[in-house]
Amino acid sequence: MPCIHPPTPEKVKDMKEESFIREGKGKLKVTIEGEETLETTMNGSLKSVEEVAEMLGVEAKDGKIDTVVDGVKVRMQKGKLELEFESGEKMKIERA
């Protein structure tokens, strides 16, 4: 069983969408929903569920993450990441 470390708020609050993306082949669609909806496409791929769980200090179950870290609701499965912030804004990163 891997050692799970509690999330460090300083580490989590400085994360941006680029923190979850690995440079390389592939395309990702990034959608930010708030007062307006913004969509863009980026080159790269999502980090694995296990890598993101380790970054956040949480445990992945059945290849998925469904948790709240520092007020941000995080849901992830292979190829798709959703973040919902306390302000009501949502960010989705998925394979294009």
Image (cartoon, rainbow, N blue to C red):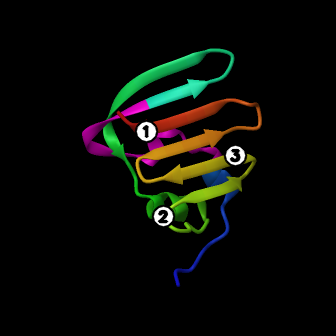
Q: Secondary structure under badge 1?
A: strand
Span shown in magenta: 13-29
On the image, numbered disc 2 is attached to which residue?
Answer: 63
Q: Give the distance between the C-alpha atoms of the residues marked 1 and 2, in whole angstroms.
A: 16 Å
Q: Are marks 1 and 3 in contact (CB under 8 Å)?
A: no
Image spot of residue 38 (x, y percent): 53, 19
Q: Give the distance between the C-alpha atoms of the residues marked 1 and 3, in whole angstroms.
A: 18 Å
On the image, numbered disc 1 is attached to which residue?
Answer: 94
Which of pointers 1 and 3 lies earlier in the amino acid sequence? Answer: 3
Q: Secondary structure under badge 2?
A: loop
Q: Residues within 10 Å of mark 1 (few under 14, many from 20)?
A: some
Q: What's under tag 1, amino acid-wise?
A: Glu
Q: Is residue 17 left or right of residue 13?
A: left
In the image, residue 27 sits, relative to residue 58, either above or below, namely above
Q: Is residue 57 left or right of residue 19?
A: right
Q: Quadrant of the C terminus?
A: top left
Give the camera-side residue of 8 and 32: 32
Give the camera-side residue of 16 and 84: 84
Residue beneath the point at 53% across and 36% down: 92
On the image, numbered disc 3 is attached to which residue?
Answer: 72
Which of pointers 1 and 2 lies earlier in the amino acid sequence? Answer: 2
